[in-house]
Image: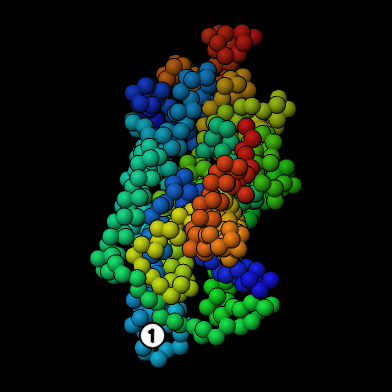
Amino acid sequence: MLKVRELRVSYGGIAAVKSIDLDVADGELVCLIGCNGAGKTSTLKALARILPAHGEIRYRGDDIVHWPAHRLIGEGIALVPEGRGVFARLSVAENLAMGAYCREDKAEIASDLARVFDLLPRLKERAAQLAGTLSGGEQQMLAIGRALMGRPKLLLLDEPSMGLAPIMVQKVFEVVRSVAAEGMTILLVEQNAKLALSVSTRGYVMESGCITMADSAAMLLDNPKVRDAYLGGE
Amino acid sequence: MDTFIQQIINGLVLGSIYALVALGYTMVYGILGLINFAHGEVVMVGALTALSIVKVLSGSGLPGPVVALLGLMGAVPVCMALGFTIERVAYRPLRNAPRLAPLITAIGVSIVLQQLMMLGWGSTYLSFPQLFSAQPHSLMGASINDLQIMIICVAGAMMVGLVLLMQKTRIGRAMRATAENPAMASLMGVNVNRIISFTFVIGSALAAVAGLMVSANYSIAHYSMGFMLGLKAFTAAVLGGIGNLAGAMLGGVLLGLIESLGSGYISDLTGGVLGSNYRDVFAFFVLILVLVLRPSGLMGERVSERA
């Protein structure tokens, strides 16, 4: 599905991502873990084409590295950004409608909306409310629901646990797990390594712009280096 | 009492025009954070285009309102194309430049448009033919004519139309989303450049209508008429809270009322020292007061995104 080769991202001469390779196969849930500032979010933003990048990003065979961002969702790539990025002055229902902006199939949109409300019942209760009045956890749910409304084939999730209460983090990850169980291909960026590895099939560890480890999630969870650095030495 | 009602009517007419122009300022600001100081000139181009069409047709025996409508049908597309071109040529190349650059460019565009129109239409005041019956209707001791009724109704209808466009349509939703977060909107598949062009086109269409209204109302058009009108409409947008559509409408109508009532009573209040020719003072007095007391404007509060 996704094949990244020698991806480089820099901010005014400072390299944030230094030539990384990364693969995500159909139906996989792959996580990218690492500390703050390791370059995880920059990687994801580059994949979503909202940050200029060099190298090769092959999505289902096409090199998308120079595509404009607005073309991605139509081709099946959706990003749930760090900090949610919901439209605060639009209602919850309008945010979800924005997720389906590129689609014309009204009946299918309605059935997808019903599915999203099924998965995230809180959104249904608050459909008429402005998104800016939701709690952080509800906004995260909305951001995921909005991305699903585009009926993506590849979902890029950036730090879905950030800034949420532990109970909310659990709920968000339950949603991630059930979306993955339906066969969605997901690339998950997370600081909470233990949680991320527990839902993933494979994982990459990123350190100061480079990928330093790549393995199955189970192996990474057992790896002493990973345990020391990211899992609190348990 | 007669004066009061009369000035309210005059104020509503003037305010409707200000509101239409203020909407153009506020829509562009909402999406780009740019004060398009050339917007007043778009109004002027609309007025002069309409004037030329109306002059040709006014001898043809067609009824006045039809001539006015045909004038609009010429002026609106011309202004739409002008607004589109201004954004493409002058602002888009500066999208990521420091904020001062597009602001200065806007003033440059404004000067260029004034001079071009002066070359074509001359530098003298041009009289605008009378298209509506001047016979006034009496209303609560004051008078109102057909043109004034038309201005208020058409401006009102256009504002309702704009609100419906923004709130009920797919493109309106995309415009609001883009105004709030362009990067996120593009991830939804919104072509942000297209939305920005569309915003300029819609604002310019409103400006064209306002141009015909203002020149018909004062029976005059002139290559430099857009400057003062633009500044006043900008004031109206700031008064209402720039970036806020309802604010621009409210600010426009309020500013029209303030200016009319102020110029109606200034002579009495100052014992005849200052006359109604000081009417322009009020707009800028309002602008200073707003900037000092409530810089975000009357409706400028925003729902903040919770972290």
Q: Secondary structure at mark 1?
A: loop
Residue A148 shown left or right of residue B63 in the figure:
right
Instruction: Write down the quadrant of residue B47 in the picture.
Output: bottom left
The residue closer to the viewer here, A109 or B116, is B116
Residue B30 vertical placement versus B215 (above, below): above
Q: Quadrant of the C terminus of chain B?
A: top right
The residue at 49%/53% (across/down) is: B234
- Where in the figure is residue A79, as x and y percent of width and height? 52, 38
The residue closer to the viewer here, A203 or A38, is A38
The residue identified by callout 1 is B58
Instruction: Write down the quadrant of residue A68 in the picture.
Output: top left
Residue B61 shown left or right of residue B305 in the figure:
left
**Is residue B205 something one can see in this rendering?**
no
Chain for numbered disc 1: B
- Where in the figure is residue A100, as x and y percent of width and height? 55, 51
The residue at 48%/73% (across/down) is: B217
Q: Residues within 10 Å of mark 1 (few under 14, many from 20)?
A: some
The residue closer to the viewer here, B179 or A95, is B179
Q: What is the count of numbered marks? A: 1
The residue at 31%/70% (across/down) is: B124
Residue A180 vertical placement versus B120 (above, below): above
Q: Amino acid at mark 1?
A: Ser
The residue closer to the viewer here, B174 or A39, is B174
Q: Residue furthest left?
A: B119
- Where in the figure is residue B297, as x and y percent of width and height? 59, 47
